[in-house]
Image: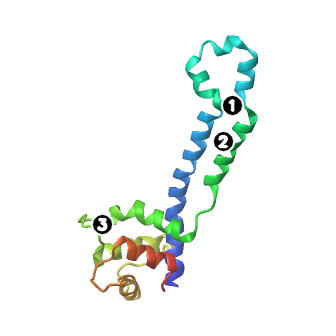
Amino acid sequence: MLKYAFLAGAMLMSAPAMAQQTPAPAQTPPATQPAPAQPATQTDPAQQAPAPAQDATATTPATPAQAAPAQTAQTAPAQPLTRAQQVAQVVDSEFATYDKDKDGVLSPAEFDAWMIALKTASDPSTKPDAPATKTWLAQAFAQADTDKNKKISKAELNGFLATGNS
């Protein structure tokens, strides 16, 4: 149950992060896609004159064979991320939010706040003060704290959430 709660929470949090990262590759290729328009500019010398700076950079990918790798590069970043990569992205983006004292590790209280947020995202009826929730949090912390120093590092949290130790 704990594993599914973590996974559901990680996926809920990673969806906005993945949505934010997906447009970046899509925005880059349109800037490099004047290649289809270049055959038209090569046949129409009047259009080449207003943009000499573009012609200097665009002369290299003017051939269709060279434009094809740019289109292939668009599809390469679209490969699905592994579960561990998705968890790592979420942990990297959200860790500072929950590390209130900015010491680079999560105390039990900071870890509990994050886990309650994850659990509430997957199960809105979660009661943070319920005995079952407190037991669940204690077990989760014990499993995540692999070096038993009473603090959770990014690496420990990544390993815990990625493997679904519950």
Callout 1 secondary element: loop
How is this picture coloured?
rainbow
| In-front residue for pair 80/51 | 51
**Residue 1, numbered circle:** none
Amino acid type at mark 3: Asp
Proximity of marks 1 and 3: CB atoms separated by less than 8 Å: no
Compute the Cα span from label 1 to label 3: 47 Å
Amino acid type at mark 1: Ala
Amino acid type at mark 2: Ala
Q: Earlier in the sequence, mark 1 or mark 3?
A: 1
Proximity of marks 2 and 1: CB atoms separated by less than 8 Å: yes
Q: Nearer the viewer, mark 3 or mark 2?
A: 2
Residue under label 3, please give it.
99
| In-front residue for pair 40/9 | 40
**Number of residues whose C-alpha sits closer than 10 Å to that of mark 1, classed few (under 14), some (14–19) or many (20 or more):** many
Number of residue marks? 3
Q: Residue at x 41, y 88 (%)?
A: 132
Compute the Cα span from label 2 to label 1: 9 Å
Indicate the position of residue 70 as horizontal and vertical percent values.
66, 42
Residue under label 1, please give it.
35
Compute the Cα span from label 3 to label 2: 41 Å
**Residue 70, numbered circle:** 2
Indicate the position of residue 103 as horizontal and vertical percent values.
24, 67
Q: Residue at x 34, y 75 (%)?
A: 111
